Amino acid sequence: MAASRDPRATRPLQLAEPLRLALSRIARRARAVPQPLVLVLTAATLLAVAWALVLPPFQGPDESEHFAYVQHLAETGSAPSSTTFSGAGSHSSEETFALDRLGLRAMMAVPEALPLWNDADQERWRAFERQVTPSQRGDGDGANPIAKNPPLYYAYEAVAYRVSPGDSLYDRLLATRLASALLFVLTVAFAWLAAAELSARVWVRTLTAGIVALQPQLTSMAGIVNADMMLVAVWSAFTALAVRTLVRGPSARRVLGLSVLAAASSLTHGRGLALLPALAIVLALAFWHHRPPLRSTLRWSGAGALVLVLGLAVFRFFTSASGGGSLYGNQTDYINQGGFSPPELLSLVWQFYLPKLPFMQPAIGPDYGFHQMYVETFFGAFGWLEVRFPERVYDALQVAVLLGLVALVVAAYLRRADLRPVRHVAFGLLGICVSLIALLHLVSYLALLGAPDPLIVGRYMLPLVVPFALAIAFVASSLPRRAGAVFGALVLAVGIVLQLSGLLLSVERFYA
């Protein structure tokens, strides 16, 4: 008589089968990823890691405050205050020791200053790290000006902080920097997906993703702790999904996805609120062009509106509870104080881009405009903006930008017959761009009513990096086949040169 089979003996096989199937599906999907995309994502990863390693601790814009937010949230479970002075201050005792004893604070935006790297300084730091207590890591209660930001990015970074394999401050900082690098890699992937909806040609997709991967200011931001990187990733995901929705038509998942991304943008930074009008524009164009049934339109819109209401409720609750107040720390209150003047705002925006007309008053604020924002601090001002390319490089880039705008207009005119069926897509991308640019100018004007700081720099334009890359790829694809390939290769070559130059300038600045 055959021995009866123990049912427990087959259980490991039963448990292993779903795992085997899941791994098999993952492997099939990995093999399906286009080789050019793999190469671009690999290059993006290497560049982001290089920036994370090259830049000394806290030598990115406001990185010390952003990290202090992350550390306080990870150590205590709560955000610091933006207004109340308590505890050790805006930084923990641990971070303060590093900033002051290793010269990291003194070198911020000071080109001549270098960190204190000698053996005695390092030994002093190691001695402090050996005896630092958990309370000295979580006592940076405030006031931290960054604490007015919503918590989404910092909650994401707090996870990286907690799972860091090393226990030193620098290990935890590197872990959070690499988490920002991951957002950058995702941004490059979203650029590919957006281009894939608009062109079947692999080289157009590769060019679009490559432009994003090689944008020097963006890659430098990918190597530091700063909420701008999540804002860029969210806007890039929104752009890719918006293009898909405009091309293929709205659906429940797409409308809900766009709404979730708009809510996530609002919960990442105050500037993220600019995605709300962009969402309205994209959905209006998608519904108008594809004309889904009215019942579906109302149902999808209602679900999306519910997501937005919940997101904005969380945003408002957080800003009220943290003392952050309204957008940009109560700067919009200038409207209620009677200082807001629409003609003055329009004049300021005009003079930002074009010469003053005879009937206009001189623009308020410093001499700051198109060149500083769209060229210098968009393409590359590294560290605390003190590491810069030579001025002739910025002059050449400005000429390239202006020629590119002319080429974009000419290409759109020559291909107007091709664009007519997809003009709603072009208007959707334009709406995304205008939404952010309009908010930046409004906030800049409100800030100038009370202080001489225009408050906007080129990195605030980085959420539009995917439309920027799509515009260049459109110009390249409008040229004859061979000329387009040469133009695309030239654009990528310039990106590589700017990348390597930025890295070398940073190495010279901090280590020479």
Image (spheres, rainbow, N blue to C red):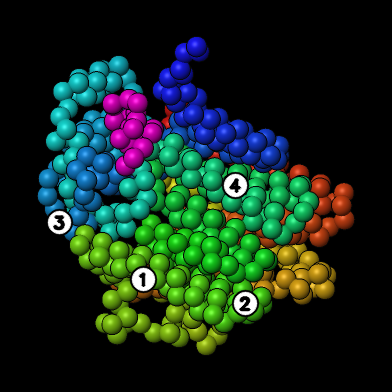
| Discs 3/4, front | 4
| Discs 4/2, front | 2
Q: Amino acid at mark 1?
A: Val
Residue 416, compared with residue 321, is above or below; it is: below
Residue 183, compared with residue 353, is above or below; it is: above
Lateral position of residue 499 relative to residue 86, left or right: right
Mark sitting earlier along the chain (3/4): 3
Q: Residue at x 50, y 24 (%)?
A: 13
Q: Main secondary structure of the magenta part?
A: helix
| Residue tagged 3 | 84
Q: Residues within 10 Å of mark 2 (few under 14, many from 20)?
A: some
Dot label at residue 309: 1
Q: CA distance from mark 3 to mark 4?
A: 41 Å
Range of residues picked out in magenta: 158-175
Q: CA distance from mark 1 to mark 3?
A: 29 Å
Dot label at residue 292: 2
- One can see residue 333 in this view: yes
SS state under label 3: loop
